[in-house]
Image: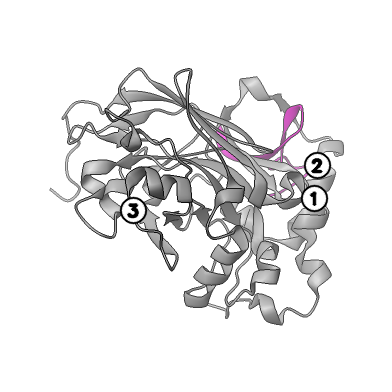
Amino acid sequence: MPPPVVASSVTTRAQDRRWRTVCGVRLVSFRDGAVRTGVVEDEVVDLTAPAVGLPGDMVALLALGAAATDAVRRAPDGGAPRRPLAEVELLAPVPRPPSFLAIARNYDTHIRELGHARPEYQTWFSKQPTCVIGPGAAIQVPRVSSEVDYEGELAMVIGRRARHVPVDRALEVVAGFTVVNDVSVRDWQRRAPTMMMGKGFDTHGPTGPWIATTDELGDPDGLAVRTWVNDELRQDGTTADMLFSCAAMIEHLSTAFTLEPGMVLSTGTPAGVGAGMKPPGWLAAGDIVRVMVEGIGELANPVVDEPGPDLPPVSGR
C-alpha cells in the first residue's frame, strides 16, 4: 500500500482543490439494474455510461480525485443518458463507506437538553457501515428496544487520502457534504461508554440524498439543520452552534489516522431529540422522519418494526 498523502506537504495546492473549484455539483448513487453514480441537475446524468466512463462505486469515483473532475464536469453536456430524478431509486451517496464516524456532544443546546457536561475534547464513536440506508428506505425499530431516537446531522464525505491535515487546509480533503440521521437506540447506547452498539443497528444510518460538493454548498459552519417527525418540527438548529468546526474535526481525526475517500464523518446534532422530551418522543412504526440541511436537501425515511424472527441458515452449518 502506498503511503498516505499528507495534506500539509502537497506540492500543488491548486490541483488538490479541483473538487472544490470546478466540481460544484451534486453526486448521487442510484440503482438502474446495476448500482451507478450520477450527477443531479434537473435529471440524473449517468456517470457510468460509456460516454463518461466513470465507476459506479462512489468510493472508487472519489478515489480518482482530480482524474475524474473533468469527466464529471463534462458529463451533463456529453450525451450521457439522463433519468428523471423521480424515476430513479436513490441509494445512500456512499452505499458502503469504508468507515462511518460521528462526533458526540457537539452542540451546546443538545448537551444542555440531556444534562451532559460540556466536553473539553472531541469525542467520536463508530457507526457500522452496514447501518447505512438511503432516501426512502425504512428505519427499523429493533425487536430488543423501543427507545429509538433520531438525530439530524450534517456529514462530511472525505474525497482524498490524507494524514496530519492542518485546520486551514482541512476542507481540501472533503469531497462534499450530505445529510445523516444518526438513529440511536438509547438504552443500548447507555450501556457502554463507546456507544457503538446503540449507534450501529442495521438501518440506523440513513444518508442522502446526495453529496453536495464543497463549491455547491459553500461555508458548512452556518447551515440550518431541521428534523421533523411526521409533520412536527422537532429540531431547528444551525451548524454555527457547533463546538468544534468541520475543519477542526478533520484536523483532529487526521492526527491519529489516515482519512480515506468515501469515509463519512457526521458532525453532531442540535437540540430537539426524542430523549430530551417529556415524555420521551421515541420513533415508532408508521412515523416518517425528515431531516433537512440547508444547501443540501432533505432526507426522508419511514419507520417500521423489525421483521419477524425467521433467520436464514448460519453460514457453515
Residue 256 in magenta? Answer: no
Looking at the rendered structure, which numbered label has been put on residue 71? 1
Q: Position of residue 77 (x, y in %)?
A: 87, 37
In the rendered view, does 243 fall on the left or right side of 312? right
Q: Position of residue 228 (x, y in %)?
A: 48, 26
The type of residue carrying mark 1 is Ala
Q: In the rendered view, tell whether residue 170 sits above or below residue 299.
A: below
Name the residue nearer the viewer: 53 or 226.
226
Q: Nearer the viewer, mark 3 or mark 1?
A: 3
Residue at disc 2, secondary structure: helix
The type of residue carrying mark 2 is Ala
Q: Are marks 1 and 2 in contact (CB under 8 Å)?
A: yes
The type of residue carrying mark 3 is His
- Counting labels gives 3
Q: Are marks 3 and 1 in contact (CB under 8 Å)?
A: no
Regarding residue 55, the answer to whether it shows in the image is: no
Crowd around label 1: few <14 · some 14–19 · many ≥20 (10 Å): some
| Residue identifier under label 3 | 116
Q: In the rendered view, tell whether residue 205 sits above or below residue 305.
A: below
* Residue in view at x 27 percent, y 42 percent: 186
Q: Which numbered disc, 3 or 1, marks the residue that appears first in the sequence?
A: 1
Provide the residue span drawn in magenta: 33-54
